[in-house]
Amino acid sequence: MNNFIDYISSKAYTDDYLINLIYNLEKNFCNKLLDQDYKIDISNKEKCDLMRFADILCRSSKDEHKNLSLRIVSLVYEFEELLEDKFIKLSIINVLTKLGNFPSINLMGIKDENTGIDEIDLDLIVKRVYNESPIKEIFTDEQLKIFNELQTNNHFSFSGSTSFGKSFIFEAFTKYLIDEHNQSDNIAFIVPTKALINQVSYKIRKLVKSYSYKVINSPEIPKVIKRQDGKYIFVFTPERLITYFLDTTNPKIDYLFVDEAHKLLSVKDTRTPLMYHALVMAKRKSINIFFASPNIPNPSVFLELVNNTPDESHAVKVESVSQNRFFVNCHTDSSYMISDYGKDILFPKLNFSGNIITDLGIILNTFSNGRQSIVYCNTIEKTILTAFEFAKTLEEVRDENIDKLIDIINEKVHEQYYLRYCLKKGIAYHFGGIPEEIKIKVEELYKLGVIKTIFCTSTLLEGVNLPAKNIFILSEKIGLSNMNEVDFWNLAGRAGRLSKDLAGNIFCVNLYNQQGYWNDDSKIKILRDKNIEETKPIILRKNNKNLYKNIANYYTRNDYTNKKLSEDDKKIIEMYGNILLYHDTVNSDSVLKDRFIDSGNNSLDVLKKIRNENSVPGNILAKSIDIDLGIQNRVFKGNKEKLPTETTYEGCYKVLRLLCEEYDWLSTESKGNYPMIRSKEQLSYYATLMEGWINSKPLKYLIQKTISYYYNSGESKEISLRKDGKIYYMKFDKNNALHINTLINNLIKNLENNIKYKIKTYVSNYQSILRSCGVDLECDWEEYIDYGTTNPQIIDIQNLGFSRTMAIFLMDKYYNLFIRNDIGEIIDIDDEKLRTSIDKKKYDEEYKELNILFEWEK
């Protein structure tokens, strides 16, 4: 029977009549985009034939047939007048039921499995029971297949479209493990950036609220929590997972979930070696590892990377949401929809003016139709400037939620912050350098539909959950590099939200008409043909002997094979070199080690020599893979000065000056597009930031201190402004809004990337070396930087799962509600007393955050 259905479906799939029907349907859809009152122009027979074809195709076992079936119903769904026809509505429900796309069935307004058609009702009843997930939401058929694979394998890797629901599957599997294994397993999630820790942690806390699990974000489990009964779910970045593994007293992790695994494929991201390093350490500890990634045709590569069986993998090709593809060229005034069933469908001229902001307004007004939209602008500068200039063309909106967020910005950031102005006009921008508290609230307002249009950078590729009906992609680049197919479709895949839309709209727009902004029509090929080729991480690629040759050159201090390597390329080589030496030092098997040895050129002898010359202990090397090996050895063997004990500006400056000299920052950290330091004078700037950060000061304090640093006693220092990839320097003007916004953006970037990451890494390395040499530490600067405080009680509160901002707030306002043990350690908080004590009106935003954490009000 199945063979017969597939045969009939194959005939339908290539039927010329169907191809013409779909092409005509797409042309009608284009007319609908231009005119919301447009009524579809196809005959009743053609409508019925379309639905019969969809019914045949949805029963097939072949992915491409199922996708075409979804394509048909997604286009039909756009026409409200068609949904008034009971036959068409029931046909769509039938197709979605056969496809197992239950989240989308809810769009049809059906309740209680009562359509009046026995076959559909029976399918709905059976599948809703059979596809029910452990968290009571309904799996799609494809999600259920993956879930079943996770249950029956000790490791697995899968990929699917951006809207597939990969995180949902991991959450459901977590619930399954907790229930089926009687809460006996410790589980960890690895996320690519710190920004995602809170997002994932909130979901997991809600999931395990009724269990004895503790959700932990810190690599050091507080002693008070260790002494309590129960298991743990960890949410870590790669570096935090590495630190966790290095403490042999920590509990064993049984399962590790790697979402956004495609980050392991990057050849330019210096965080990729860190993630690989963490995963090899996890493999060495016999942890069950599961990978999820978007759009990868060969997800087995992630299993190969850690020497697991590559057969236990699956690439999901069935789409959850269909997508319409468009190209808009403002400079030739030509716009069209790309069709797989005929020629490009041309739109009438839109009468573009040549003014970037005016033309952007024409595009958004023409195509967004009041639906939520994402505008991708690539660089931070382009994102802010485009949003800010576009906001000037809009009327102010009146919304209580927006007004509250603007008040928060005034109170906690600055009155001249550009985002504040954009919010007044009902739009926003989003990138990694926005204050975390503000960014979370922007995301909340967007998800609520209060903000309709959001301008963004590639942070959206990091797993931030901001889908939309429309996405307008203004550049084919990420930074200075062209987007690869995986990144492009991960970004474009944000168009269309499962359970909210049957289809999303992708627009590539040549707005700026300059290099990197779709000014070359040949770049549109990536949009025309979603044919993502198989790819592998750099250490698995064939004929990649240069990597291993350059690792040997790093060890022997010879020139690299390419003298034009970027600083990031060099850093990646050095990081893999340090990881390799660590693997050799602890006698750990790894693909990296095997391939290096097999690469020839006396690699084994080189490795043996560097191992014998190295004095840095393995546990220190493991935690400091991004610090030059030669420098680590020099520091280890040299005279070591103690770190100061005072956490004043002077103390911070002494720490920075000592590290700058010991690790030769003026040589190692002064090159590339985003150097940490260009001259010793910058140490005073970092000391200013560092002093405020580690002494529990809020962002507004840091901003004011930095303004004072740049403008002191009427004398201005130069501030760096970036435009079109170039850096310009000019005297800081505290009354200039552009200068203020640049200062704030630079401050947050320097705080996150340099102080909380790079400088903390150097502090950690230096303190570890001191400890290994028997030097007692009177204070822990690494901990101060990591937690943003020197107060041990605020650290204890953060370890209970609160953010730094919330921990400081609770310490200040509700210190008496914390529960302590016999020796005064904070072990919990009386959340019921907190709920009744907190002033909701005065502390409205704090109450909302606590409500999410404790679920006081559902």
Image (spheres, helix red, strand yellow):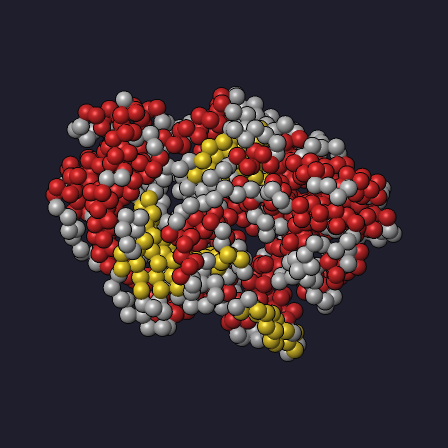
Nearest the viewer among 499 and 472 is 472
**Residue that appears at 53% across and 55% down:** 432
Name which residue lies at 72% across and 38% down: 597
User: Residue sitting at 19 percent across and 35 percent down?
Assistant: 52
Query: Where in the figure is residue 344, as x and y percent of width and height?
Result: 29, 56
Q: In which quarter of the image is residue 364?
A: bottom left
> Depth check: 484 or 422 in front?
484
- Residue 757, horizontal then vertical, whole percent: 65, 51
Q: In this view, does 516 lie above or below 735?
A: above
Residue 711 is at least partly visible in this image: no
Tell which of 533 and 657 is nearer to you. 533
Task: Answer yes or no: is residue 33 visible.
Answer: yes
> In the drawing, does residue 213 fall left or right of residue 547?
left
Residue found at x 20% / y 40%: 50
User: Quadrant where the N terminus lies?
Assistant: top left
Q: From this viewpoint, which residue is outermost toward the right?
A: 639
User: Picture coordinates of residue 420 (x, y %)?
Assistant: 45, 63
Where 682 falls versus 236 (above or below)?
below
Residue with the most extreme bottom position: 714
Which residue of the protein is positioned furthest toward the left in this rendering? Answer: 44
On screen, 720 above or below 105? below
* 383 in relation to 843, above or below: below
Quadrant of res 67: top left
Q: Answer with left or right where residue 363 lies relative to residue 631.
A: left
**Number of numbered markers:** 0
Q: Observer-nearest residue: 313 or 664?
A: 313
Point out the image quarter for the C terminus.
Answer: top left
Which x, y percent locates residue 708? 63, 70
